[in-house]
Image (tube, rainbow, N blue to C red):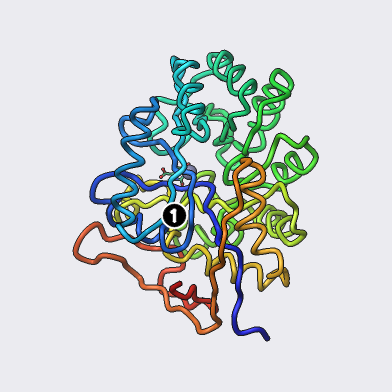
């Protein structure tokens, strides 16, 4: 059994870093593991202009620390009234890498999201024309649809018709959780890909709900039944190039998670690569980890692959129950567990 695993330096193609003290606390965890990350814009207020993205990028760089070469890749938050020219200018200036579509009400800080996708037709047309990726939180939000069906119904009602109307639009379906999404992306054209989180490869709804409710495993899209997790695991095990790493690491203070109305989000940044490695080893496909974490993403985004490598050792890693016990009190993914692999310091 191999004792070390060396992979191309990886990127995280879906990440929440927040702002202020929380940003300062969490950014170093990602910067230690990843060279670049696609940073989600769902701050309060959301990032809707190139200027706001550029200023946020500076705060992230400062939080990553002076010795870090971490590169934040910025996104704009689409609203019903966002200006297509602002988006295009930000993309062409190299400030914005992509736009994020949150259906209004779908998740954390999505109140300003899009209420009807047809309201952003002008933006989508410009994005298709300039080749700017659209990153989608793919869930319908109407109250009549069961929360476990929201992703599947989004494919039928929103994503399929939108792709018919904008066949050249380049789309990343984010944090997929269902066999339906696996099949939709696999069967689609070259302009659609998907990110898969470390947690959706490991947990199903029983892990969250059976024998007691575990708020630290609550995220959106919510973990589904086991067969869906198995579909996600099966597709990464094939090394399929349309599926790549996006942690959706989403920190919330412990008191906001352990609450009568707990926030959605799993803070996986401190253990992300170790968690993916654990899964890929269980699946017998460790040989695909390097491309999943460091090649499929940049190829879709038309960005250069990272130089260099990182190494994981099979020395075991004990995950703390709590991070920063005096401050924000974050509970990381895998809290209290022992993982096989440990990322070595470069
Ligand atoms: O679980 C989630 N947390 N899903 C999202 O879509 C948003 C994220 C957050 O910002 O907390
Ligand atoms: Zn997210």
In terms of depth relative to the viewer, which is nearer, 202 or 43? 43
Q: Position of residue 133 (x, y in %)?
A: 59, 32
Q: Position of residue 96 (x, y in %)?
A: 47, 32
Secondary structure of the residue carrying numbered label 1: loop
Q: Is residue 107 above or below residue 21?
A: above
Query: Position of 340 compared to 335: left or right?
Result: right
Q: Identify the image quadrant of residue 86.
A: top left
Can you name the residue that lies furthest to the right here?
187
Q: Is residue 336 above or below residue 298?
A: below
In terms of depth relative to the viewer, which is nearer, 206 or 201? 201
Q: Position of residue 259 (x, y in %)?
A: 31, 51
Query: Position of 272 compared to 57: left or right?
Result: right
In terms of depth relative to the viewer, which is nearer, 327 or 263? 327
Binning the other alpha carbons within 10 Å of mark 1 as few (below 14), some (14 to 19) or many (20 upward) gives many
Q: Position of residue 194 (x, y in %)?
A: 65, 44
User: Residue, x 44% and y 38% (percent of image)?
Assistant: 74
Query: How many numbered marks have been drawn onto this rendered protein structure?
Result: 1
Q: Quadrant of the C terminus?
A: bottom left
**Residue behind mark 1:** 266
Query: Position of 228 compared to 333: left or right?
Result: right
In terms of depth relative to the viewer, which is nearer, 158 or 55? 55
Query: Position of 270 compared to 339: left or right?
Result: left
User: Residue, x 42% and y 58% (percent of image)?
Assistant: 30
**Label 1 within 8 A of ligand 1 by Cβ:** yes
Q: Quadrant of the N terminus?
A: bottom right
User: Residue, x 68% and y 41% (percent of image)?
Assistant: 193
Q: Is residue 275 above or below residue 40?
A: below
């Amino acid at each position: 059994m191999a004792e070390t695993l060396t992979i191309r330096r990886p990127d995280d193609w879906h990440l929440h870093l927040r702002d202020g003290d929380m940003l300062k606390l969490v950014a170093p965890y990602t910067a230690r593991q990843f060279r670049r990350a696609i940073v989600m814009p769902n701050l309060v207020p959301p990032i809707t202009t190139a200027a706001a993205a550029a200023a946020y990028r500076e705060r992230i760089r400062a939080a990553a620390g002076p010795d870090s070469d971490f590169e934040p890749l910025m996104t704009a938050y689409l609203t019903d009234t966002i200006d297509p020219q602002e988006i295009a200018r930000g993309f062409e200036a190299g400030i914005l890498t992509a736009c994020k579509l949150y259906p209004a009400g779908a998740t954390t800080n999505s109140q300003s999201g899009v209420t009807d996708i047809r309201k952003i037709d002008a933006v989508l047309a410009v994005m298709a024309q300039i080749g700017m990726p659209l990153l989608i939180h793919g869930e319908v939000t109407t109250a009549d649809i069961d929360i476990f069906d929201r992703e599947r119904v989004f494919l039928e009602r929103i994503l399929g018709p939108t792709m018919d109307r904008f066949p050249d639009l380049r789309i990343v379906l984010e944090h997929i959780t269902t066999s339906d999404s696996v099949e939709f992306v696999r069967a689609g054209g070259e302009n659609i890909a998907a990110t898969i989180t470390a947690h959706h490869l490991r947990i199903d709804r029983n892990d969250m709900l059976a024998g007691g409710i575990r708020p630290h495993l609550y995220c959106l899209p919510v973990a589904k039944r086991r067969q869906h997790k198995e579909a996600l695991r099966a597709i990464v095990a094939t090394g399929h190039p349309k599926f790549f790493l996006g942690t959706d690491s989403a920190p919330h203070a412990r008191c906001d998670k352990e609450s009568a109305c707990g926030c959605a989000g799993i803070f996986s940044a401190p253990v992300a690569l170790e968690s993916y490695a654990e899964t890929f080893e269980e699946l017998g496909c460790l040989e695909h980890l390097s491309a999943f974490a460091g090649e499929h993403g940049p190829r879709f985004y038309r960005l250069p692959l990272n130089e260099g490598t990182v190494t994981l050792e099979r020395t075991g890693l004990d995950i703390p129950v709590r991070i920063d016990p005096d401050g924000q009190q974050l509970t990381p993914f895998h809290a209290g567990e022992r993982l096989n692999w440990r990322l070595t310091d470069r």
